[in-house]
Amino acid sequence: MIWNPKYEMMPRKDLEELQLERLKIQVAKVYEKVPFYRQAFLKKGINPSSIRSLDDLSKLPFTSKQDFRDNYPFGLMTVPMEQVVRLHASSGTTGKPVVAPYTANDIDMWSEVMARTLSSAGMTKYDVMQNAYGYGLFTGGLGFHYGGEKLGATVIPTSAGGTKRQIMLMEDLGTTVITCTPSYSLIIAETALDMGIDLSSLKLKLGVLGAEPWSEQMRQEIETKLPIKAIDIYGLTEIVGPGVSVECPSRCGMHIFEDHFLAEIIDPNTGEQLPYGETGELVLTTLTKEALPVIRFRTKDITSLNVEPCECGRTIVRMAKITGRTDDMLIIRGVNVFPSQIESILLEIEGVEPHYSIIVDRERHMDILEIQVEVSEEVFSDEIRKMEALEKKVQEELESTLGISPNIKLVEPKHIARTVGKAKRVIDHREL
Ligand code: ADP
Ligand code: ZN
């Protein structure tokens, strides 16, 4: 179902006109209200009147996570605090968090894009949505919550964690849709198995999963272990939270709600804009945000854009599944390795479970890559010889694709720590 056909199916020419009109207003606003932007514009020798067409977007300066940190907490805000009705913040695991203020109109816009998101995923007002994204400062919980209510569905705000209780409620309250991170969906599956509950005997049928990278192979694992169609959703705190883009039932890319978010792909090394179809770093500009408009935010997420018409009828651009981040690439003995590549290879191998850790260390100036991966109960209790054969197979598959030889450690089921939110799969002990 298309929640807002007017904006999701707008002829591209009209959409581009609307985007330009909105962009001009956002640019004028940040120039007037935010010293950081004014200085950045002046440094490039431009001002709001420099924006005459969408092509002029590339004249504008980029914004990065560091700029958010430098202006912590409210330096990028464009409205007085009395207009702000809510504050969220990112996890801030690597320093000060990003603070995201919202006006009442921002919350309305966010609920609207989340209603579109859930509708695109296949949800309707007849659904019962169990929301296992974390409630709190993290944008996931409340973002989904407001979208579900706007759609008219029944929302159960369980938040993340308490997995046994999640499953009991799922059974008792007739949950049809689960919303959580892909990794948490697997914990739900595993816990149900332990409890002797067959999830396929419940009403559950759809999962709207995101907030962390997950490969197509991971999607297959999830769909085998849970009775759901798994839909990918993307978003980030700096831009709005979840609700930037989502798959439609065709699952061939995530449609970006372009009347609110303007997307570009750049070469992460040169900053040059790349044409549709080419892979690079996603850059997003908000078009309607009031409290925190953001110009050309470098997401570090690697994807490509496809503007071809989609089967579903939406005209808005699609972004490919994220294959990694410019800052999650590991350089091991000089070879570039993305965690997503490792995940894809591991999950193609029979007997290997979708729980793994990538551990990097340095011994006597040599990088060591160790991959710990769980194997199924059957494999683990099998003869040593069979375990060794599997270990060798994993080792060879990885070596032939990555070009470096990792140490493989097959571990028993549940050996690897489970997290209820975003999974942490890479542990880098090197001091780089
Ligand atoms: P933090 O993790 O710092 O709290 P966010 O929650 O805003 O911040 O995280 C946003 C990031 O999460 C994105 O830039 C992207 O790297 C990742 N992400 C979100 N959704 C997806 C998705 N569907 N696929 C891959 N990565 C995603
Ligand atoms: Zn579509």
Image: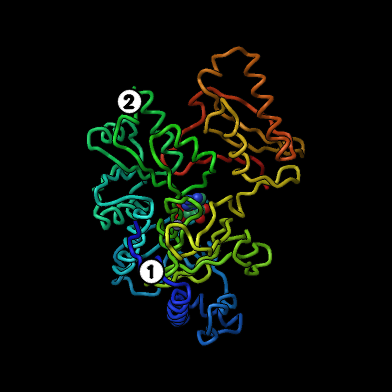
> Residue 74: which disc?
none
Q: Marks 1 and 2: in contact by CB < 8 Å?
A: no
Placement of 398 over or under 322, stated as above or below: above
Residue at horizontal 28 percent and vertical 39 percent from the top: 175
Residue behind mark 2: 197
Residue at horizontal 62 percent and vertical 67 percent from the top: 275
How far apart marks 2 and 1 lie (CA) works out to 42 Å
Residue behind mark 1: 7
Q: Judging from the image, what secondary structure is the residue with disc 1 in?
A: helix
Could you tell me which quadrant the N terminus lies in? bottom left
Q: Amino acid at mark 2?
A: Ile
From the top left corner, tell me how far across and down residue 158 is, in percent.
Answer: 29, 42
Residue at horizontal 30 percent and vertical 43 percent from the top: 130
Residue 335, image quadrant: top right
From the top left corner, tell me how far across and down residue 406 is, in percent.
Answer: 70, 33
Placement of 320 over or under 165, stated as above or below: below
Q: Amino acid at mark 1?
A: Tyr
Q: Nearer the viewer, residue 401 or 414?
A: 401
Q: Nearer the viewer, residue 145 or 415?
A: 145
Count of all numbered marks drawn on residues in the image: 2
Placement of 14 over or under 417, stated as above or below: below
Q: Nearer the viewer, residue 298 or 35?
A: 298
From the top left corner, tell me how far across and down residue 254 is, in percent.
Answer: 48, 56
Placement of 378 over or under 409, stated as above or below: above
From the top left corner, tell me how far across and down residue 280 is, in percent.
Answer: 62, 60
160 to the left or right of 36: left
Q: Between label 2 and label 1, give the one nearer the viewer.
A: 1
Instruction: Classify mark 1 as within 8 Å of ligand 2 or not, answering yes or no.
Output: no
Q: Judging from the image, what secondary structure is the residue with disc 2 in?
A: loop
Residue at horizontal 53 percent and vertical 85 percent from the top: 52
Instruction: Classify mark 2 as within 8 Å of ligand 1 or not, answering yes or no.
Output: no
- Closer to the N terminus: mark 2 or mark 1? 1
